[in-house]
Amino acid sequence: MRNDESLRLSDDWTKSDRQLERERLRRRSSLRSGSVATVSTIIVIVLLFWLFTASPGWPRVRETFFDPEQFAKALPDVLSGFLLNIKIFLIAEPLILLVGLLVALARNLTAPVFFPLRALAVVYTDVFRGVPTILIIYLVGFGLPALGLQGTPTDLATLGIIALTLSYGAYVAEVFRAGIESVHPSQRAAARSLGLSHGQTMRHVVVPQAVRRVVPPLLNDFVSLQKDTALVATIGPLEALRQAQIHVAGNFNYTPYLVAALLFILLTIPMARFTDYLAARSQRRRSQ
């Protein structure tokens, strides 16, 4: 009977005048804020456009960087090269995740017998985080084939994937390690008290929590990885940047670079917004 009465009262409940007024003011404030933001954005865009078009060198820049004919001419080749960039990214990404996770786990081994493995992981992260990615691509792309070892890959794209994996694996390893160390020690203690070994604790308790916590920074690294696939052009594969360079060398017009830049933007911006969404969702979960 009491439940039926509560349901009846809840159905009859209506918002007070004060609450309705508060909601109306909130909607008005939101509309005003959105209008101000829109107008200010339009003003800034117009001012920037005027600043560029009114500059003395704008006609020369427009001819050199914004030539519609050169844009249409270069687009098919640059787009075909961009597909190679995407291929490199899709192959390198899971390899980087694997290398990074293994290195992070190696750095968390505490038994004295694993000291050489732990030291090797520390040296790897220190060296490959300290060397610029483009230098690693040069060293792998030209140095690895020069060794003459049997089975050494000679495909330039494959060498680029190896270089990017070595470089970004060090950064991702530190991201994973930070995620692992952020898991409270009580989680490990509780797992060990239940009879789980160190490996089982890491596999079933620590690593799943760590991975969920580091997804946003990992996606940030992969946004950078997608852009850095263009660095592979330094050793010769016909990806987007190399195709643009070929067109630029043929007509001395830099519009093909604009084509390549737009293609990278079309891919990286959705990834960046998705990263922001995941970071905001993670923040909301922690605040609840």
Image (spheres, rainbow, N blue to C red):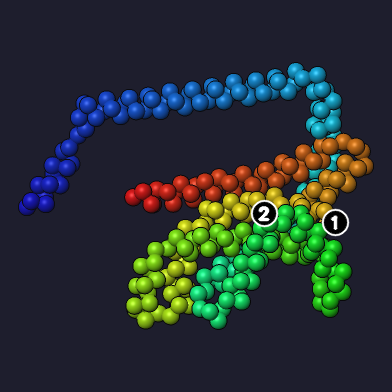
Q: Residue at x 54, y 53 (%)?
A: 217
Quick one: label 2 or label 1, which is nearer the N terminus?
2
Secondary structure of the residue carrying tag 1 is loop
Question: Dots 2 and 1: beta carbons under 8 Å?
Answer: no
Q: Label 2: few (<14), some or many (≥20) within 10 Å? A: many
Depth check: give the residue in front, 246 or 210. Answer: 210
Q: Residue at x 37, y 68 (%)?
A: 187
For residue 124, side relative to residue 141 (left or right): left
- The residue tagged 1 is 236
In the picture shown, does residue 199 fall above or below 238? below
In the image, 27 versus 1, the foreground residue is 27
**For mark 2, what is the residue?**
225
Question: Which quadrant of the figure has residue 45?
Answer: top right
Q: Amino acid at mark 2?
A: Leu
**Circle 1: is it few (<14), some (14-19), or many (20+) Cα within 10 Å?**
few
Could you say which quadrant of the image residue 266 lies in? top right
Which amino acid type is shown beneath numbered disc 1?
Gly
Residue 232 drawn at (x, y percent): 78, 55
